[in-house]
Every structure is written in C-alpha cells, then in structure tokens.
Image (cartoon, rainbow, N blue to C red):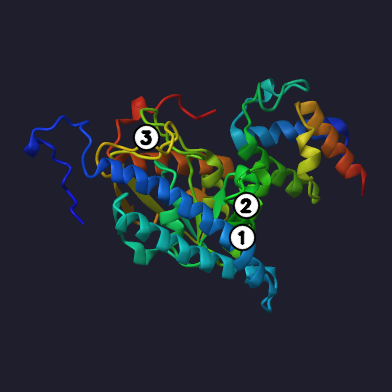
Amino acid sequence: MYTREAIVEQVRTTLFQLFEIPPERVTLDARLYEDLEIDSIDAVDLIDQVRRYTGKKLSADDFRSVRTVGDLADVVYRLVQEA
Amino acid sequence: MPNGSTAVAATGDRPDAKRDSYYWRLVATGLSFLVFGIGQLVLGLLIFPIVRLLPGDTTTDNARARALLRRTFRLFIEFMRCTGVLTYDFGGVARLGKPGQLILANHPSLIDVVFLLGFTPSAGCVVKVELWSNLFTRFAVASAGYVSNSPTDLMIEGAAAALAGGQPLVMFPEGTRTRPGEPLHFHRGAASVALSAATSVTPVYIDVNPTTLTKAEPWYRIPARRPHFCLRVGADIDMESFRRMASPPAGSRAFNSLLLDVFFRELKLAPKDERGPPTEI
C-alpha cells in the first residue's frame, strides 16, 4: 500500500515538520548527518516519527546503517513490506 | 570553614604564591585518589557481590548499590574536607531527590559527580561509556545501574527508564568536563531527556574557585590556594511550554538554548555572543 515514492515524499514532509529542512534539499543521495545536519539526538526523534508513520519500530541497528535519504526510504520500505 | 578568604591582598603575596598548606594538600590530594580507588575496589570485589546475594531482583540490587555509593561518596567528600583538600557549600540540597527528577549541572571538575550523587538520595546518573572499562569505576557503574552516554539512542532510552522507575537522575549537558577558557556548550541529549521523560527539571550551578581537577590538568597540578566548591540548587524549570512546541526537536532546541542562558546568568559567564558557534541547524 506504500510505494517507495510515497515514502520518499513522507520523508520530505517529516524532515520539514521536525527540522524545517526545505524539501528541495532532501534528495535521495543527500546525507542525513553531513548534508542535512541531523545529529544523533535528532535521529532518535526521527526513528520515533517512523514508528508513528508505519506503526512499527525501526531498530536502532537498522538505523545505524542509514547514511542518506535514499537509505532511510529503503529501510522504511522494507519495514512496511515485512507486514 | 574559612570561606571568603579568597582575598590575597591582605598578605601582599603574589596570587600564585603557594598557600593554604600547599604541600600537605598535594599529599592529601594523592591520598584522596588512593582512598577512592581502594574504596571502589572494596565495594566492587567484596560489598556489591554480597549485596547481590541478598533477596531481591536486579532493580533492588541496583537501588541498594546506589544507596551504598551515596554513603561512600559522602564519606569521601568529608575525607577531602577534613584533610584540607577542599572546602564546599551546597545550597538547596533538600530539593534534590524527587522521583523522576532530572538534575542538570555544569561540569567544572572531576569530582562534581561525587557531590551530586553523595547528596541526592537514590540518584542515578548518565556517565560516559569509558567508565565501564575503568578498573576503579566499572563496579560502581555496573552495580548501580547507571546509564551509559553512548550510543545516544540507548542513552535516551536508559535515562527515560531510570526516571520512569522513580530515580532522580543526574546529567551533565556539557557531556564532558568544561575546558577552562572555552565557551560553555550543551549537547541536546539532556534536553531531549528533559522533554520526554522528566517529572521535574532542576539545575545545579557548580562554581569551583580556584579551578581544580579540570579536563586540562593532571591530578597533581593542584591550585595555589585551597579550592572551594560552591554548589547551588536552582529553581525548577517549567517544561510545559517546550513540550507544547510544534515538534520534539524544536522543543529540545528551545529548551537547550534557555538552559544555556540560565547557566550563563547564574554562573556569571561571558555574554552570549562569546559562547562560540551556534548549535542551530
């Protein structure tokens, strides 16, 4: 029920709502830490937001492998496919 | 204790002249480290294992260990006071120790945590992960169930669990000891915990004069004068307005900024624009 495109769009919306990052900066290869300046505390809030959106808990281990917006969309996509 | 004796003009000595029984204080400082180390080993190898044999689950064991540590920290502080290593006063202690209370302090010296844990009933603490691999601290941090500062997500979970379990929790938002001369900087981890899990948030302002046991110096470089530790418990910070903000990151940023302002004001530090690069995104 979720397409990958819809998830990327949701990531854009969420990053804007949480951190006021302009959606045009949120490209698939934008790096969360270096390019978008999301720190480890932000990451905790972001994981929480993923849980609200998908109803599932993204494990911190999964999140550690996330570097870019594309990676994030991928792990969320896998998460919702697991159902 | 002779406090307020910081005026050196009376004797006409140079301010860096060695005073207040300098060489005795040097010996006593070394002795304090020795006593601390031996005390921790005795607790870790003898006392805590016995505590674990008593009836009760891990939560009970941890609470007993924290109570024991509190007493030993108090003894240790009195040892340092009686041997003339330092003098101190701690104002407002009665307001420390409420269940779920987050206690946020600045971190000028190595032994700040000894004061805070020595004077706060049943307190937990967020401590750096390295203490689990230090021979002299590993037993205490493990037995008391203190929370490791790393990785960040587990720190926030652990801190929230400790507060939810009714512990008062001590955190140093600076993350590490202040480097003298460098601007005060707070990590947002403490702000995040304050926002999401604390029932009350209480600042403690610590002023050590002259500075001692800072990040920048080894233990034997003691100050020319006997250091005085002044700890003051501040008024609770109301979290409601921060919790009502649009998103948790916005709330934690706003709280962190206010917290920094409060500490700057109370510690009479240089004005805001000298605090270094802004933490805003």
Residue drawn where x is 46% and y is 55% of the image: B35
Foreground label between 2 and 3? 3
Residue B44, labelled with which disc? 1
Asked if residue B234 can be seen in this view, the reply is no
> Do discs 1 and 3 belong to a common subunit?
yes
Residue for badge 3: B221
Determine the chain carrying the residue at label 3. Answer: B
Dot placed on the residue nearer the N-terminal end, 2 or 1: 1
Q: Are marks 2 and 3 on the same chain?
A: yes
Amino acid of disc 3: Arg
Along the line of sight, which residue is nearer the eye, B56 or B32? Answer: B32
In the rendered image, is residue B206 in sight?
Answer: yes
Quadrant in which the C terminus of chain B appears = top right
Q: Is residue B218 left or right of residue A70?
A: left
Residue at figure coordinates x 69%, y 74% from the top left: B53
Q: Tell me where residue B265 appears, x and y as whole percent.
A: 30, 41
Helix, strand or loop at mark 1:
helix
Furthest-right residue in view?
Answer: A82
> What distance separates the C-alpha of mark 1 from that of mark 3?
29 Å
The image's mark for residue B138 is 2
In the figure, is residue B95 to the left or right of B46?
Answer: left
| Residues at circles 2 and 1 in contact by the CB criterion of under 8 Å | yes
User: Residue B209 location, x and y as percent?
Assistant: 28, 41
Q: Given this view, does label 2 or label 1 mark the residue nearer the observer?
A: 1
Q: Are marks 2 and 1 on the same chain?
A: yes
Relative to residue B52, is residue B168 drawn left or right?
left
- Report helix, strand or loop for mark 2: helix
Q: Residue at x 79, y 51 (%)?
A: A55
* Alpha carbon distance from label 2 to label 1: 8 Å
